[in-house]
Image (cartoon, rainbow, N blue to C red):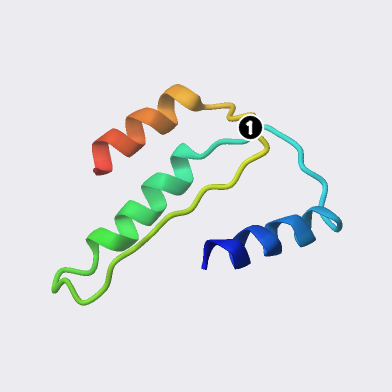
């Protein structure tokens, strides 16, 4: 569950260095294109974004989320 995801995130913080810029709009759009390619409804996609809180393209990310929702 979500506890496992958060545990994995905290473990990974010990071995990675966070740096920017952090741009999520391209990721949102990429996942949306992948989801749109599945036309028969046999799959669904969940995009979980875990961040350090600094999103460099906040306006573009919000726009991307609204556009693909």
Task: Give the side of residue 51 with respect to residue 61, left or right.
Answer: right
**Residue 32: x and y, percent?**
32, 52
Identify the element where label 1 is drawn: loop
What residue is at 38 percent from the left and 29 percent from the top? 62
Spot the residue most to the bottom. Answer: 42
Quadrant of the snapshot with the C terminus: top left
Q: Is residue 69 above or below residue 62?
A: below
What residue is at 37 percent from the left and 46 percent from the top? 29
Spot the residue most to the left. Answer: 40
Q: Nearer the viewer, residue 10 or 42?
A: 10
**Residue 11: x and y, percent?**
78, 61
Quarter of the image where one finds residue 51: top right
Task: Give the side of residue 11 with respect to residue 47, left or right.
Answer: right
Q: Is residue 8 above or below residue 22?
A: below
Q: Is residue 37 above or below residue 17?
A: below
Quarter of the image where one finds residue 52: top right
What residue is at 64 percent from the left and 29 percent from the top? 54
**Residue 66: x and y, percent?**
28, 34
Q: Nearer the viewer, residue 19 or 8?
A: 8
Residue under label 1, please give it: 53
């Amino acid at each position: 569950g979500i506890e496992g995801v958060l545990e994995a995130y905290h473990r990974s913080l010990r071995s990675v260095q966070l740096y920017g810029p952090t741009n999520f709009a391209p990721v949102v759009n990429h996942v949306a294109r992948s989801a749109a390619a599945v036309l028969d409804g046999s799959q669904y996609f969940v995009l979980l974004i875990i961040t350090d809180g600094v999103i460099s393209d906040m306006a573009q990310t919000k726009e991307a989320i609204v556009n693909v929702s």
